[in-house]
Image (cartoon, rainbow, N blue to C red):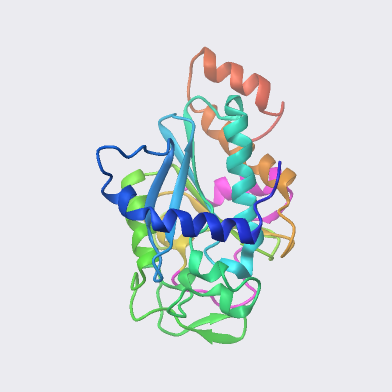
Amino acid sequence: MRALTLALLLTLLAATSAASADLLDPPPTATPVPGITLVGHSVDGNPIVAQQLGDGPMPILLVGGIHGGWELNTVLLMNEIAAFFAAHPEDIAPNVSLYVIPAANPDGLRHGRKAEGRFNANGVDLNRNWGCNWSAEAFWRSQRVDAGAEPFSEPETQALRDFITALQPVAVLWYHSAAAGVFAGHCTGEDHGSAGLADVVGRAAGYTTGQPFSAYPVSGTAADWVDGLGTPSMDVELESAQAVEWERNHAGIMALQCHFARLGAGDALEAFVARACREGEQDG
């Protein structure tokens, strides 16, 4: 499986951008790309796309690259995930569909692993621009960052918000690097299942789980906002800033699918669980 290089990814983004008008309003002769949905556009007009894999009634959304080039390895991981499950559809639970957004912040990709690559073309940190616990005073490490003029001020977060609202996924995973942990989203009020599913993913992938992110204060995050919808959500933080950590993240996604497969009934689901789910694996 060949990882998507930055140069190739930018070429694909440019090509998709040039055709984005056709995706939004296709002419009668246009040939749609199966399984590819245009989620929206960035500040600079680059497309944000989602790939659907499987057709089960329980969508799981996987999102990489919300911090652009600064977390390029999450974009490459999403590419490998999409390529693997496209080649191995039998590894998708019959009641699940996977939706993969490789690059939620395509403008930031152009800068590579530089601090400016973390932000969109307006200089906004997209993971401080969501509507739960948003604050104009936002941080990355010890420095102040721009959280936007208000929640959802940016076209990227608006597009992702609308896509998630329409999709109604059963879980949303946001991939980051490199805090080596799985951190459950939490907005306000009752438990929406984020902590339990974060434990399922974290234990299978071998990342620390069960603790809140405490390296520095965070506000207005995507995972918290999704949790506030009543949908389980989490940040999956890779251990490395360069490696994609394919094996452990594949294991985490399979464990999550097994959790939902066990909620259903029927011969196809029983066969999937018997083949793909580890014996003795416990749900969180």
Can you give x and y, in whole percent of width and height, for residue 189 in the image?
A: 39, 59
Q: Residue furthest front?
A: 29
Front-most of 177 and 5? 5
The image position of residue 222, as x and y in percent, is 46, 62
Quadrant where the N terminus is found in the figure: top right
Q: On the rendered structure, is 210 left or right of 188?
A: right
Nearer to me, 5 or 61? 5
The span shown in magenta is 193-220
Q: Position of residue 41 (x, y in %)?
A: 38, 61
Q: In this view, does 51 lie above or below 263?
A: below
84 versus 39 height, above or below = above
Whole-percent x, y for residue 273 in the image: 61, 23
Q: Which residue is drawn at 58% across and 39% down?
A: 256
Which of the 4 quarters of the picture holds residue 21? bottom left
Whether residue 29 is visible here, answered yes or no, is yes
Magenta-colored stretch includes residue 198:
yes
Q: Is residue 205 left or right of residue 147?
A: right
Q: Tell me which residue sits at (50%, 64%) in the image.
A: 106
Q: Quadrant of residue 224?
A: bottom left
Left or right of 163: which side holds 13?
right
Return the residue nearer the eye: 17 or 262. 17
